Amino acid sequence: MTTLNFRPAAALSGSVAVPPDKSLTHRAFLLGAISDRAVTVENPLDSEDTHATLQAVRALGAEVQGDVSDDRVVITGRGVRGLTPPPVIDCMNAGTLMRLVAGILVGQSGDVTILDGDASLCGRPMRRIVDPLHAMGAVIEPTDDGTPPLAVRTGRPLHGVVHDLPVASAQVKSCVLLAGLNAEGETWVREPVPSRDHTERMLRAAGVELLERDGMVGVLGPVDSLSLPDIRVPGDFSSAAFAIVAGVLRGDPEVRVTGVNLNPGRTGLLGVLARMGADVRVEPGPDVAGEPCGDIVVRRTSLLQATDVTAAEVPSMVDELPLVGLLGALAAGITTVSGAHELRVKESDRVATVVGLLRAVGASADEREDGFVVIGGRSIPGGEVQSDGDHRLAMLGAIAGIVSDGGVTVHGFEASAVSYPGFADDMASIGAQIA
Ligand code: S3P
């Protein structure tokens, strides 16, 4: 287990090029595997999650040249329904992999494939994909608790459905649309609030005509061919969020985060920061991979104001809500996050783990069933925290240390490699002291 101590920093300055987008790397690999043409994925994210996806793509019979640690990976796919399902796919910690690959797998021909994962993933809810896939005619079974491993019997004929998502989720939406590629007729998905649309953008770029009606998105299947263009993966907003928040609290004169994916389904944190009075400037650049991209420049804000984050904002900042807890602890007033039940079923129960971490560093925070409440206005003394095996918790602890009075020791810091292996180096490059 790795333990790191993040010391208080009086000022942070400089530029950070955050790692490539995790959501886009997963999707580029998976859609590459069902594409007709060889797809070059430049600048893929080198992390444990995306390594799992590339392994899965290999196991499914796509030809892969290169690795996640390379600047480019070339995937020669097998077409929309030409994959060869293996007996087991290990999804490790990656919920996005498990939910998206399930949608692809049900349309392939083979025997039984087990979708497995680590202890964290095997505690996460899968009925949200199992139910719509059943409705489409797929045979896919979770454990009695509705969790992985999932047993998928491939080779069943699928038909279209209209699926109403009870909770907005890009993973579930993507799973159903990907299954729809191999289903007979129209497959529709309706979300209560729109979630990130990376899958839709990539499918369109690959030549799939998506349907739109009454706020729903759909696909008319079966789709015979996918021709994904080569793709260069831009920086990940969810990784950038750590440097952004650190810069809002300690940027002097400023912290610049470069080449970040600014898909509006991801950037809800920017609206929240604006409400809190933070000094944040977005410098839009050219689109990359069909996604809006740019730089974000932040400066220390002397006094942030508390805010209320509500259900409608949650999908566009679901992975950044832990950072809102930290911002709230240092803002004037009481910050609340509500309508965020989803936090309870992330890589850890992030309502409990975020509140636990904030308390451990001396902040005043309380759980709510669907979020949390943070009483701000005081500095953070610091302390010792555990990552609980959750990458975003490990990095939240790090930023808490950097903006604390006494520093924070983070146990289990290795979890950060799930999405951001170079995090400590990047923070050190803008002035963080790490021991
Ligand atoms: C993701 C969607 C979100 C997010 C996750 C990545 C994706 O999950 O939390 O980190 O790439 O589609 P949900 O779809 O469960 O909200």
Image (cartoon, helix red, strand yellow):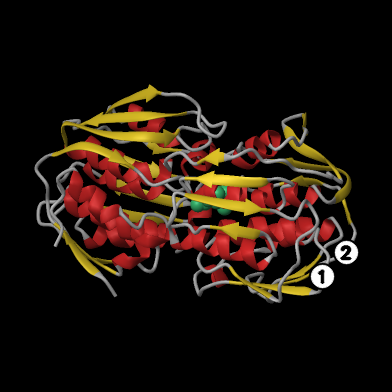
Camera-side mark, 1 or 2: 1
Residue picked out by circle 1: 110
Does residue 33 show up?
Answer: yes
Q: Is residue 192 visible?
A: no
| 8 on left or right of 259 | left
Identity of the residue drawn at 70% across and 53% down = 77
Residue 70 location (% of width, % of height) = 44, 54
Q: Quadrant of residue 246?
A: top left
Position in image of residue 190 (x %, y %): 72, 40
Residue located 14% across and 45% down the image: 431
Q: Is residue 301 above or below residue 26?
A: above
The disc placed on residue 19 is none
Mark 2 is on which residue type?
Answer: Arg
Q: Residue visible at 26% across and 71% down?
A: 2
Q: Which residue appears at 49% of the width and 41% of the height?
A: 233
Q: Is residue 290 left or right of residue 206?
A: left
Tell whether label 2 touches label 1 (CB within 8 Å): no
Residue count near mark 1 (Cα–Cα under 10 Å), binned few <14, some 14–19, many ≥20: some
Which residue type does callout 1 highlight? Gly
126 up-or-down from 303: above or below: below
Of the pair 240 and 85, the residue shown nearer to us: 85
Cα distance in 3D space between marks 1 and 2: 10 Å
x and y percent of residue 321 in the render? Answer: 40, 46
Q: Find residue 156 and name its label.
A: 2
Left or right: 244 in relation to 72: left
The secondary element bearing badge 2 is classed as: loop
Secondary structure category for the residue under label 1: loop
Question: x and y percent of residue 98 in the render?
Answer: 62, 62
Instruction: Give whichever of discs 1 and 2 has the lower sequence position.
Output: 1
